[in-house]
Image: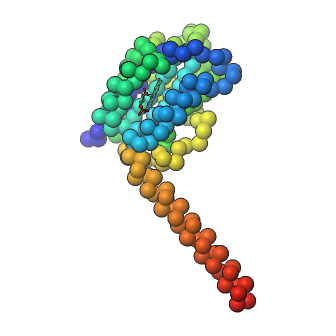
Amino acid sequence: MSDLVQIVYVSRSTFTTMPAELGIEPSVARILAQSRVNNARRGLVGALYFGDGCFFQCLEGRAADVDRLYAALLRDPRHTDLKLLSRRSIERTRFSAWTMKYVPLDAEMKTLLHELGQQAFDPYRFDADTVTRVLDMLTRGSDIEPPSAAAAPQPVAASPASATAGRGSRWGWAGVGAVAVIVAGIVAMRAFG
Ligand SMILES: Cc1cc2nc3c(=O)[nH]c(=O)nc-3n(C[C@H](O)[C@H](O)[C@H](O)COP(=O)(O)O)c2cc1C
């Protein structure tokens, strides 16, 4: 039995938003940046969608870490009316490669909303089936940024970022070593050639 859970919640932003055509909302960009740093440290992963003033977020990781973050989210004045849509135990994380994936889904989301007969993104009205469809869209969609190096793909669990950071720096030193050997070879050839 794994200790991993996945939660999906929705909320309403308290900041005023600009038209979506102008790109990513600065307040959302700040939340994303903060989330990516924090989640990498805590071994959390997930995905975030923002549309028509509403957030739809999926968080995955160890139960205690996810629940601690959700308690902090409930106190965050940047959004309100948090509603937990699902919380379930999982064997493996779906968003393993992403400390917080952000997918601007516009065309696909518009099609879904049209199908549901909704004019705007209103995740409070989503049933379990629609939540699954949105999660699938978030899984398939491309982030506006490449996957975070701190959250390299984890087949089973999102492990603490320190574990993967260590792996990254080892490769870094191997690269420096290889360059040093090549430079030494060129110097030797010049000196003795
Ligand atoms: C919609 C939304 C999503 C957020 N997602 C995360 C998240 O994934 N991870 C995180 O650490 N903080 C997230 N935050 C921020 C938290 O509510 C909280 O401010 C933060 O975790 C506090 O930690 P810090 O003071 O150590 O940065 C989010 C906030 C909002 C409004």
Q: Is residue 154 visible?
A: yes
Q: Is residue 132 left or right of residue 188?
A: left
Residue 137 location in percent, x, y? 54, 29
Question: Observer-nearest residue: 130 or 157?
Answer: 157
Q: Quadrant of residue 187?
A: bottom right
Against 9, residue 145 (above or below) is: below
Q: Quadrant of the C terminus?
A: bottom right
Q: What residue is drawn where x is 61% and y is 35%?
A: 144
Residue 71 location in percent, x, y? 34, 25
Q: Quadrant of the N terminus?
A: top left
Residue 37 location in percent, x, y? 47, 39
Q: What residue is drawn where x is 53% and y is 61%?
A: 172
Ligand number 1: quarter of image: top left
Q: Quadrant of residue 119?
A: top right
Residue 106 location in percent, x, y? 63, 23
Q: Is residue 42 left or right of residue 52?
A: left
Q: Is residue 94 visible?
A: no
Q: What residue is drawn where x is 66% and y is 25%?
A: 23
Question: Observer-nearest residue: 86 or 53?
Answer: 53
Indicate the colouring scheme.
Answer: rainbow
Q: What residue is drawn where x is 42% and y is 47%?
A: 161
Residue, far bottom: 192
Against 172, residue 49 (above or below) is: above
